[in-house]
Image: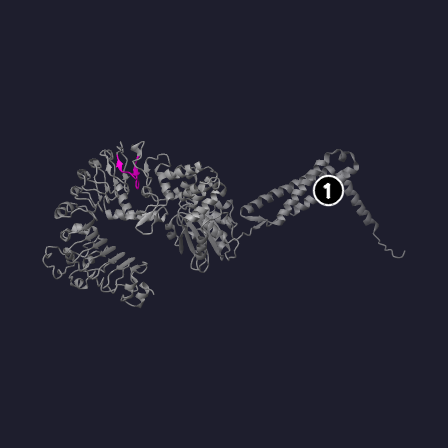
Amino acid sequence: MGGCVSISVPCDQTLSQIGRCLTQKASYIRKLQENVGTLQTATQELKDLRDDLLTRVSLEEEKGQRRLATVQRWLSNVETIESQVNELLLASGTAEVSRSFRSRFEYGKKVFKKIKEVKNLKSRADFKVMAERVPRSKVEERLIYPVVGMTAMTEKVFSSLMEDKVGTLGLYGMGGVGKTTLLSQINNSFVNTGNDFDVVIWVVVSKDQKIESVQETILRRLGLCSEEWKHIKEEEKASEIKKMLKGKRYMLLLDDIWSKVEIQRIGFPSPTRMNRCKVVFTTRSKEVCSEMRVDVEMEVKCLASDEAWELFRMRVGDLTLESHPYIPEAARIIAEKCYGLPLALNVIGETMSSRKTIQEWSHAQDVLTSFAADFSCMQDKILPILKFSYDNLKDEMFRKCLQYCALFPEDYEIEKEELVEYWICEGIIDGNKDRDKAKNHGYEIIGTLVRSCLLMEYEHTEFLKMHDMVREMALWITADLGKKKESFIVKTGSGLSHVPVVQDWSVVQKMSLMGNEIEKINACPYGTKKLATLFLQNNKLVSISERFFQWMTELKVLDLSSNESLTQLPADISKLVTLQYLNLSSTGIEVLPFGIKSLTKLIHLNLEFTHKLKSVVGISNLLSLQVLMLFESNIPLNNGLVEEELKSLENLELLTLTLKDAFVMERLLNIHSLVNFTRHLSLDKCIPNAVRISLVAGSSAPSGHEDRPLQHMKSPNPMYFRSLSRVDIVNCEGLRDLTWLMYAPSLTNLHVEMSFQTEEIISREKVMKIDGEKLTTPFLKLESLSLVFLYAVKSIYWGPLPFPALKYLKIHRCPDLRKLPLDSASAKGCGLVLDAYKEWLRDVEWEDEATKNRFCPT
C-alpha cells in the first residue's frame, strides 16, 4: 500500500520482551510478599541514611553553617517517600487487595515501583559536602527604646570615630546614664548607611566575663562557633578569629567593660591607620580608658533638665499626665528627683504611668524625698545597677569614703581638702604616721572615685559633687540595703527645727543635719556609743543642751560651723575624749569652753571667721593638734599668745592667720616651726610697721623706718614659708614691696588691695642683694593673682615669668603699672583669664607682638 512503512522485528526478540514483561507482571502477584519485605528493608535503610545525614548536618549547622539546598531537597524527598511507603504498606491487608486478582496485581505493581524509587533515592545519599558557611550581614541591628537627648552626642561620637587618626574610642560614665544606648545607636547607624567595614561586631563583656566566652560570642558572630569550641584552648580560638579577620576591616563594639581588654589576645589585630579598623567601648571607669590607651575618650553625661522632662513625660504617657490637673506639676518634681539619669527616668516614669490619682503622685514625691530606696522600683531596678560600681571599688576603705560623701546635702559642693580632713579625723584614712602621706592617699581615693564616675569634679577642681542617685545608692547601702535606716541619719536641708527622734541611738554611726532651721538642741541622746560623725553646720543654733554630748564618747568629727548665733558650747564637751575634728568657723563663739582642755586627741581645730572670739586660752593643752585655723578670727595675737599658746603646739603642721599687728608678725617670723606650717596668711591694716616684713628678704629698712631695726631676726632659708599657699594683704600702708614672697614656693593665691605705698611685688634690687641664697623662679604654683587699688605699683617682676599654673590675673586701678611679666609662652595651657579694664590694656607695654596677640587680641 502506498504510504505504508513496514518494520521487521525478529520474532525471537519480540517473544523475549513479551516474556519478560509477562514474567515481571506475574511477579507482582507471585512475589508480592517478598517485594513487600524488600520495600520495608529498603525503606528502613533509607531512613537510617536520612538519620545519619541529619546528625552530620546538625553538627555543621551548630558551627554556624547552612545546609545545602540539594541536601534539603533529598531530605524532603525521603520524607515524602516514607509517607507514601507507609500508606502502601498499610493497604496490604485490606479486603480488596486480598480478594481481587486485579487489585492484587495493581498493588504489587505499586510495591515494585516504590522499591525502585527507594533504591534510587538511596543511591543519591552520598553527599561529600552537606553545608556551607552562611554569609553574615555586616551589621546586626540592635533593638533600642526611643532615645531622647542623645542626638548631638551620637553625632559627636560618630564624627570623631570616622577620623583616620582615631582607632580606639572610649565612652565612660556612671551606671544608667545611657552608654549602652549610645553604643547601640552607633551600631545601628551602620545598618542603613553605606560603609566599607567588612563586619561590625557587638560584644557585651560585663564584669566577670572570661576571655574565652568573649571569643565564643565573636566566633558565633563570624559563623564559626559550635559546642566543640568550648573545649578548644584560648590560643586556638584567637588564631581562628585572626584567620577570619585577616585583610578585613572590622569595627568592634565592646559594651560594659570593667578592666582592660586585650583585643590581640582575643584574636583582633590592633586598629591602625593602615588597617582602618575601629574599637569602641563603654565603661563606668575613666581609668579603663587610660588602660586601653584610647585615642579619644568621651564622657556620657546625664540629660539636661528639658531633655530629662521629655523622656520622663514619654514614659509616663499623656493619658496619665492628663488624668488630673495637678499631676503634671507633681510629675515635674518627681522628674527632677531623677537628676537627669536616664535609668531612673525610664524606670520611675514607667512605674508612675499607671498612677492616675494625685494622692499616688504626692505619696511618690514624699517617698523620693525622705528615703528614695523605699520607692517601689528603686531596690529592684535602679539601685542595684548603680551598686555594681560601688562593689567594684578596690577595698572597704574606698567604699567607706564614698559613703561619707552621702552625708552632704543634694547637689552640694564638697571641698576636696575638707573631705580628706574628715576622712583622716574619722579614722577611715590612717593619719597617725605621716600627715602628708595621709592627705596624698585621700586625694588618690578621690581620684579613683571620680574616675569610677561615683563622684564628679565640680567647675573648680578643688570641689566635688555627688550625683544624687549615687547618693541615694550610698545611703541605701549604709542602711544595710534599707534594713537599718538609723545607722546613717541624714536629714539635710529638710527644714527641721529640732533634732529628729531616734528610736535607738546605740546603732547610729553618723548623723548629718546640715542646712536646717534648728535653733535649740534640748535632746539628751542616751547610749550613743557608735556615733563617730555629727554634722550640725549651717543651722540657726543658739544653744546646745548641757547633756547633749554626755554619751558621745566615740565622737571623732563635730562640725558646728556657720551658726552665727551660737555664742558658747556646753561644759560637757569635755566628754568628747576621742574627738579629733572640731569646726567652729563662722560661729558667734566668744570664749572657748574650759572643757576644751580635755580634748587631748584633737588634731584639727577650725576657728576661722570667729569675729567675736576674744581668747583661745587652753589650746596649749591640745598637744595632738596638727591643724589650727585662725584666719579672720578676732583673737588678739599678743605676745603671750604667740609664745605661750602657739609655741607649745609641737605637732602643728598647718596654720592660718590674720595679722593686724606688725610686731606680732615680727615675733612670728622668729618661730620657725610656725612659719614653716603657715598656709594662709592675711595682713590686714598693718600700719605702719608692716614694712618690716620686707626685711625678711635681707635688705635694710626703707628711709624713714629705721627706728626699729630687726637685728634680732634670724636669717630665713629659701624654704622659709614652705607651706604658704594663700596670702591676702589689705590696706597695709608703708609696705613698699613683697619680695619676701620669694620664700613662698607653694603660693597659689595672692591678693593685694589698697596698699597705697606698694611699688613692686618682687624687688629686683633686693633679690640681687641676697647673698648665699639660691632662689628659685617665683610663682611657679601661683593660680590666682589679684592686684586692686595699688596706685603706686609699677612692677610685678622685672622680666617675663613662666606662670605654669596661672589661671586668673586681675589688674584693677593700678594706673602706674605698664608692663606685665608675661611673654607668649607664659601660662601655656592654663586658659589664663586676664581681668582688666580695656582702657588700661590699651596702654600696656607688651613683651612682643605675639604676647599682645595672645593676651590682648584686637
Query: Which segment did they paint magenta?
Result: 508-521
Main secondary structure type of the part rendered in magenta: loop
Seen at 29% across and 32% down, the residue is 506
Q: Quadrant of the C terminus?
A: bottom left
Residue 116 visible to the viewer: yes
Q: Is residue 765 above or below residue 608?
A: below
User: Picture coordinates of residue 125 (x, y %)?
Assistant: 63, 47
Q: Is residue 699 above or below residue 54?
A: below
Quarter-of-image position of residue 554:
top left
Instruction: Give the residue number, with chain letter if any, for mark 1.
Output: 112
Residue 400 visible to the viewer: no
Pointer 1 local density, CA inside 10 Å: few below 14, some 14–19, many at least 20: many
Q: How many marks?
A: 1
Residue 464 placement, left or right of 240: left
Residue 351 placement, left or right of 452: right
Amino acid identity at mark 1: Phe
Seen at 37% across and 47% down, the residue is 453
